[in-house]
Amino acid sequence: MDHCVRRSVLLGGLVENGNTILMPKDDAIELMGVVTEKFPAGMFSVNCDGRSVLATLAGKLRMNRIRVLVGDKVTVELSPYDLTKGRISFRHR
């Protein structure tokens, strides 16, 4: 019966579920940046602290049709695994 029960153990912010280790979505790194270039398919190049990050629009921004233009100040959420790709989560006024 024990092999059927899946136990989750909290390990310093990581959750172990069976053989995979999952990170909570709250561990995203948030940075402020400025949009420097717009690419097709909703991709943007954002300059964050001298680094160039390739970012897409978050689902809520797409759903509410928030327009992001070159020169806009945005908040970008970066994954701890790949710091060159991110998600635009907020456009500042």
Image: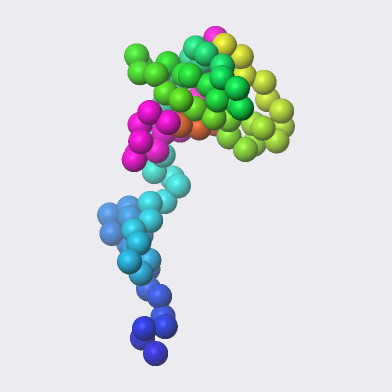
Range of magenta residues: 71-85
Task: Note whether residue 69 is visible.
Answer: yes
Q: Residue furthest front?
A: 40
> Is 53 part of what is drawn in magenta?
no
Left or right: 13, with 73 as reference point:
left
For the point 56% across and 19% down, the residue is 39
For the point 35% across and 18% down, the residue is 51
61 to 8, vertically: above or below: above
Q: How is the image coloured?
A: rainbow
Question: Residue 26's image quarter?
Answer: top left
Residue toward you, 56 or 29: 56
Percent x, y for residue 28? Answer: 41, 39
26 to 47, vertically: above or below: below
Residue toward you, 55 or 2: 55
Task: Note whether residue 90 is visible.
Answer: no
The quarter of the rendered structure image containing the N terminus is bottom left
Left or right: 11, with 6 as reference point:
left
